[in-house]
Image: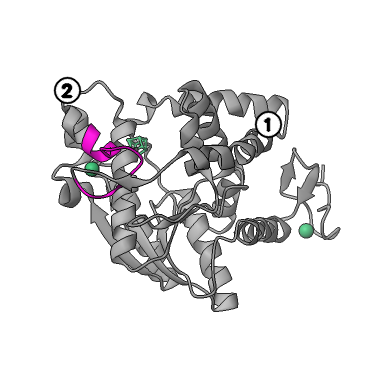
């Protein structure tokens, strides 16, 4: 049976059914719909100024590669922001080294300046070494906290005034759920897709905040991106995986669940942001929500 016709152009056969909106899209219409959605989020949350210098966190995975390609396209059309890609090498043998190569090649092809920073250089040990030590917390807790610090430092050193990350709608919805399950409502403030400014802290923006992960995967596939084949060996330790499974099941049964969960966060963010006062860590001097930052707390725990 022939594929149904695209509901946007009414010409080409559709390759994708967007269950939550009812659209059936051909490849070109699907790709332009993703770009329009990213552009829409950038405008609505006032993520960029014409003169912004944007550091883009590029892990080498499908989400960050999609982000880099779309931002480059937008930047080429508007001659607006200046892009610089930053890859963090956490030091996960067999996993991150493959992604680092993919990120470097993608940046070279796009003509985007690329910088690499590593956990080893910044914190004195790789993620594999941290994971092998005696620890109570999951590997992903260390990895996430240290990666956020590494990206902030690298973006600041690159003179960037924005730090764009490839967080998708799924990541946003999972974080909402995790913050609720952990009782960490204050952390909702960090989910603001447009980010906030604070001394020493590069404003974080999330241009893919309204794009489901399934759609970044298709975007990457249709774009012929080189993609990673190995999963992270520590991925199974994360509670996030449980939140992902639950939300995916809900989304399959009730299309639109991811958007509803994300919209809940948008309503909670202003109250959460008002309750968070940024200060300076008394050990390392980096921006922190408490007296001692998460990085210093974690390094002390090991
Ligand atoms: S799965 Fe966890 S340990 Fe692996 S890269 Fe992601 S955050 Fe780091
Ligand atoms: Zn079409
Ligand atoms: Zn500190």
Which residue lies at the image location 68% right of the left edge and 31% below the top edge? 257
**Mark drawn on residue 21:** none
Q: SS class of the residue under badge 1?
A: helix
> Secondary structure under badge 2?
loop
The CA span between labels 1 and 2 is 38 Å
Q: Residues within 10 Å of mark 1 (few under 14, many from 20)?
A: some
Residue annotated with mark 2:
134
Q: Residue at x 15, y 42 (%)?
A: 125
In this rendering, position of residue 207 left or right of residue 227:
right
Magenta residue check for 149 = no
Q: What x and y, as percent, mark residue 91?
A: 23, 44
Quadrant observed for ligand 2 in the rendered image: bottom right
The stretch of residues the image draws in magenta is: 284-297
In this picture, is 237 found above or below 122? above
Question: Residue 213: in sight, yes or no?
Answer: no
Q: Which residue is mark 1?
A: 257
199 and 77: which is toward the camera: 199
- Image: 83 above or below 192: below
Q: Visible in this render: residue 125?
A: yes
Asked whether residue 295 is drawn in magenta, I would say: yes
Query: Front-most of 80 and 68?
Result: 80
Give the percent coordinates (x, y) of residue 51. Answer: 49, 75
Figure coloring: one colour
């Amino acid at each position: 049976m022939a594929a149904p016709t695209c509901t946007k152009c009414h010409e080409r056969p559709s390759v994708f059914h967007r269950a939550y909106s009812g659209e059936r899209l051909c490849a070109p219409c699907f790709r332009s719909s993703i770009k329009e959605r990213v552009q829409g989020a950038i405008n609505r949350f006032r993520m960029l100024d014409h003169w912004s210098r944007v550091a883009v966190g590029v892990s080498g995975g499908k989400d960050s590669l999609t982000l880099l390609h779309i931002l480059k396209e937008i930047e080429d059309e508007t001659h607006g922001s200046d892009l610089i890609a930053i890859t963090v090498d956490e030091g996960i043998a067999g996993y991150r080294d493959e992604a680092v190569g993919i990120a470097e090649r993608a940046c070279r092809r796009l003509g985007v300046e690329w910088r690499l920073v590593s956990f080893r250089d910044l914190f004195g040990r790789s993620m594999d070494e941290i994971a092998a030590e005696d620890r109570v917390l999951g590997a992903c807790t260390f990895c996430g906290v240290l990666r956020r610090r590494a990206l902030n430092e690298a973006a600041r050193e690159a003179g960037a005034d924005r730090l764009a990350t490839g967080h998708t709608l799924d990541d946003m919805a999972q974080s909402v759920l995790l913050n609720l399950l952990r009782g960490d409502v204050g952390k909702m403030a960090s989910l603001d897709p447009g980010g906030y400014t604070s001394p020493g802290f590069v404003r974080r923006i999330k241009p893919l905040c309204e794009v489901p992960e399934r759609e970044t995967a298709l975007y990457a596939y249709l774009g012929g991106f080189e993609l990673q084949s190995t999963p992270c060996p520590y991925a199974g330790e994360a509670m996030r995986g449980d939140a992902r499974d639950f939300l995916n099941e809900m989304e399959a049964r009730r299309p639109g669940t991811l958007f509803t969960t994300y919209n809940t966060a948008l309503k909670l963010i202003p109250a959460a942001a008002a309750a968070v006062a940024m200060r300076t860590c008394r050990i390392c001097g980096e921006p922190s929500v408490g007296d001692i930052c998460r990085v210093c707390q974690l390094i002390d725990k090991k």
